[in-house]
Structures are given as C-alpha cells and as structure tokens.
Image: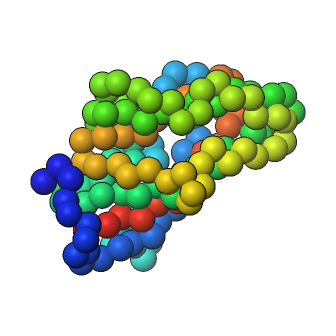
Amino acid sequence: MANPNIVNVTSIYGSTAYQFPTATTANLVAWTYAGVPPATSGTTSLTGLTPASGSVNRVTSIVVSNITSSAANCTVAFHDSTAGGGNAQYIAYQVSVPPNASLIVMDKTTSVYVTEYQSISVTSGTASALKYVATLETIT
C-alpha cells in the first residue's frame, strides 16, 4: 500500500530521528530513532525517513546544527523514490549554517508527507560538521 488513506487513522506515533554525516556525500540512511511503536530501549535505523508499508511519515521539522567553528553548507532533499533515488526536490540547497549555530530547515508549517516509496536525504558540505534532527509522526 503505497499511500494509505489517513482519514481513518489507527494510530499516530511521534518520534525524533537524527543523523550525523561523517562524509560530504548524500547521506541516505542512518536516521536513528526510537522506533514505532516507540521502543523502550535501543534504536532503529530509518532509511531516508521512509515509513513501513501501510504507513505515512509526516516530517514536521528538520533542524541542522553546526558543531564546528567554521561555516558549513547543508542540503536537504525530498526524493520520489526510496533511499534517495529518483528525482530530488530540494527543501534546502547548499544553505550556509554559521559556526556554532542551528538552522531550522523546516517546521510544522512546512511539513511534508513521506510515503513508503519516497525518502529524504541530507548532504553536508563539510564532513562531521553538521548534525541533523527531524521530528516525525508515523501515521497508520
């Protein structure tokens, strides 16, 4: 089921996912989060914020923090295929994040829905400089 009807939802689970790219290539995996339903311990990897079959992820915010003393560029892209495949539509493209600062790339007013055949990737212009945090709701 690629895009379930969310009018009559069974459940909505809120989660916070994060990743810390250590390279300057597009990071398509490694969004780490508590899992759905929320796990009591441990974490799960969520490839490109893509939900499980029969679910939709509503990504409500993405914040990027620069943990270095130099500016670094960030790119956040929405893909029409899983694992960063297909066409990329940029939510933020090579935006400079000042040193020791954070940038709100998107918030609840600009949230996006990610179905099981879509994904979100991030790219850092400087390796190990930017940390990404996303909040999402998994709707089933």
Q: Quadrant of the C terminus?
A: bottom left
Please tell me whether residue 91 is drawn above or below residue 103 in the rendered image.
above
Q: In the drawing, does residue 107 fall left or right of residue 17? A: right
The spot of residue 35 in percent (x, y) is 38, 64
Dividing the picture into quarters, in which one does residue 24 lie?
A: top right
Q: Quadrant of residue 39?
A: bottom left
Residue occupying the far left of the picture: 1
Q: Is residue 40 left or right of residue 98?
A: left
Query: Camera-side residue: 9 or 26?
Result: 9
- Residue sitting at x 57%, y 57%: 109
Q: Is residue 94 left or right of residue 99?
A: left
Q: Position of residue 19 (x, y in %)?
A: 54, 45
- Image position of 74 with respect to 106: above or below: above
Residue found 59% across the figure and 48% down from its top: 106
Query: Could you say where residue 99 lies in the image, as x and y percent from the top left?
Result: 84, 35
- Can residue 15 be seen in this snapshot? yes
- The location of residue 103, given as percent across then percent down, is 72, 44
Q: Quadrant of residue 70?
A: top right
| Residue 124 visible in the shown view | no
Query: Residue drawn at (20%, 63%), measured in percent from left and top?
Result: 5
